[in-house]
Image (cartoon, grey):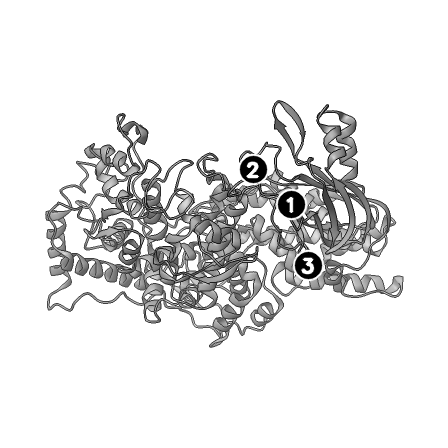
Amino acid sequence: MKKVLLVAALTWVTVGVAASAGWYAPHPPAVRAPQTLAIEAPSEPAVIPVSQPLAQAPTVARTVSAEVAEYRQMLDKYCVTCHNERLNLPAGAPLYLDQANLEDLMADAAVWEKVIRKLGVGSMPPQGLPTPGEVKLAEFRSWLAASVDRAYTAQPDPGRYVLHRLNRTEYANAIRDLLGLEVDVTQLLPSDGGDFGFDNIASALPTSPLLLERYLTAALRISALAVGDTNASPGENVYPISLDVTQKQHVDGLPIGTRGGVLVRHNFPADGEYVFRGRLNRTILNGYSGLEGHETPHDFVVLVDGQQVYSAPVGGPKDHEANVPEPNKAEWIEEINDRLSVRVAVTAGPHEVGFTWVEKPAKEQTVYKPPLRDTQEVHMAGGVPRLKTVVIEGPYNVTGVSDTPSRGRIIACRPASAREEPACAERIFSTLARRAFRRPVGAADVEAPLTFYREARAQGGNFDEGIRAGLARLLASPAFIFRAERSPDNVRAGAAHRISDLELASRLSFFLWSSIPDDELLNLAAQGRLRRPGVLEAQVRRMVADERFEALVSNFVGQWLQLRNLEDRVRPDLLMFPDFDDNVRKAFRRETELFFASVVREDQSALGLLNADYTFLNERLARHYGIPGVYGTRFRRVELTDPNRRGLLGQASILSLTSIANRTSPVIRGKYVMSVLLNTPPLPPPPVVPPLEASADKEKPTTVRQMLERHRANAVCASCHRNIDPIGFALENFDPVGRWRETVGEGLDVDSLGVLVDGRKVDGPIQLREALLSRPEIFVGAITQNMLIYALGRGLEPADMAVVRSIVRNAARNDYRFMSIVTGIVESAPFQMRTKLTQPDTVVAQANRRVE
């Protein structure tokens, strides 16, 4: 069947060729012609306001040309001295203001957007240089932003929306919501590219014949898991456990009274027997190899859906005596492995399998303060036995396929006879296709899966095998894998127009859920009711309250705040931080995710991300912070009594991510705040930069701050570091893993005093937070800009910044409440409109007709 699928999918190559021919270029022409907004349907208005003008500059009785002349004179006097084509400053990202056109702002829109951004954070002119004053600069910025916004309102451009392949996360979520099946797509599909900080950018998601074959393979495997397969061959699934995971504590989801191990959520393809195996960590001690923790007896336990199905003793005097003389003896190791294996009958479908140990009520304490981590060295033999991997193997002796959640989603009818099977199959595929393709479907849409169903039946397969073949074909369809939008025929190429309600529903669900629309949203769109007054906002609030909104929390926050990098980048020095392990690293990320989700779902002010007086902790993270009274592995809301801990700047996820293994890095922390929270990234460093340690005093202990101050003695270095370092210095009381400290490792006091780019003095995280909150529109603008990129699946053009400012301005009237930002994005022109392309619409339509 795979060969047939490959032949049927050859037309996908057309999509890949079109992509390479320029479909994915997200940038519209530099010079935009005035555009006509065409009406898509009589019931819908032709034009959606792109934005409201920015707050007007102070009313002055003078002409526009007089304003232009005055501001040109100001630029020539205070700015052009550095920002001119002759000096080519700043190095690496020159900004030429001597040639920038103030009379036609659209001619140099990108330049003026940079100016608006720089003036917004008070970074220009630099400290110590002549300035026209804060009032005049604020007036110029307001005039500039308002003028740009008016120009874009007169020539609205919602941007190009190109063919969008589902990324791995979206594909997995779509399978979950379509079939009720959780799949690990990392084993099926390669990792996705990224751009503009996110992995759902259409231009960074190209296709290739090899990738298409991976999607076909995934469709075959997923259909077998979803429907079940009595002919499934035995296979082995290995689930590794990181060596730096502490396994002496309770694991969420496992019964109370157990410790360590892992809980695996596994899909079983058929009713039958499966082998469950655990493998212990091997260790090195005094030159001998052996198995960890064999000195004392421990009870190994296997559970299925919370019920114990196996138990075996491991360790104790006999195992110790057998291990010490010949720790590498194959017979002894094999005997332990056999003891950790069991064959169990399990029904088809998803089950939770636990591999763990019985917790001992009393523990021997041989040191004054036991470490929070299992061991000080991952290969040390002390402590308790720890699992290295667990394995699920099977099925053997298959007896059938029981009803499963996915079969309940798929099998919409049960034919009583062979004559009823074709009609039942058509009903099944019609129901699935409507959800999979995100639109109403007709006979032509289900003909392809029905053809595969008939061929499987003709080859001797039963009804289930026919459904499985048709489902594989449906999951391999371009209409499922790609998000394509079509423009009405009566709209000319290059014109902007409203997208249909069905396309809007798809955009909305992939924005908030990273998945396909549910029935309620799809029905509203199909009935043309989604844009009725109050309906769209009500759907947004419903979807934010839904558990599927966790996808936005995980994906958007994980990429905007770079939390996805925690596992790879946060690797503290084990000798300096002996208690650090993977458990606390995962807790770092979960704290920030829960915190962000609470701000959004409770419709708090977005500024709460900086100053909220609460967070979410479990016992392990609370002990890391030194906060008493929190017990257990469950995360719960905890009020903060220390104002230094408030908001994102007090959370270890951010603080550890912006440090290195053995010390803090004010440079990385300062750059992070500027780039992520303020959207004003500093210039990249020059090609050759000496290591910071080269600035250390060889005669006496030196703090990181003292080394940086010596480094900044170089005028070239100082030009950037004077903007970056003060932010990082304000956070120096937090060590590399986010704990509070008053002194650094050398015994010297922490010095957190600094002067920001706008001349404001800050000393510590509280004053830094106050400085950021003093310019709320900058922080909220950074959130809005990144969320709009994520929602649209493309980078922003200068025209989009007018929309960002409009959303921020409207949110300000509502105390910057988060739902004002989310609904502002959903109701914006870039989200609800698109510009008609030329070749892509035609090719997509032809490709869909051929494949469907």
* Quadrant of the frame with the C terminus: bottom right
The residue that label 1 is drawn on is: 215
Question: Which image quadrant for residue 384?
Answer: top right
Q: How many residues crowd around disc 3 within 10 Å: few (fewer than 14), some, or many (20 or more)?
A: some
The kind of secondary structure element at disc 3 is: loop
The kind of secondary structure element at disc 2 is: loop
Residue type pointed to by label 1? Tyr
Q: Which mark is residue 180?
A: 3
Closer to viewer: mark 2 or mark 3: 2
Question: For this view, does 661 lie left or right of residue 325?
Answer: left
Q: Nearer the viewer, residue 440 or 548?
A: 548
Q: Which residue of the protein is positioned furthest toward the bottom in this rendering?
A: 533
Q: Measuring 21% from the left and 39% from the top, which residue is drawn there?
A: 719
The CA distance from mark 1 to mark 2 is: 42 Å
Q: Does the CB distance between marks 3 and 1 fall below 8 Å?
A: no
Question: For this view, does 750 lie left or right of residue 606?
Answer: left
Question: For this view, does 345 lie left or right of residue 756?
Answer: right
The kind of secondary structure element at disc 1 is: helix
The residue that label 2 is drawn on is: 375
Q: Residue 743 location in percent, x, y?
A: 32, 42
Closer to viewer: mark 1 or mark 2: 2
Q: How many residues crowd around disc 2 within 10 Å: few (fewer than 14), some, or many (20 or more)?
A: some
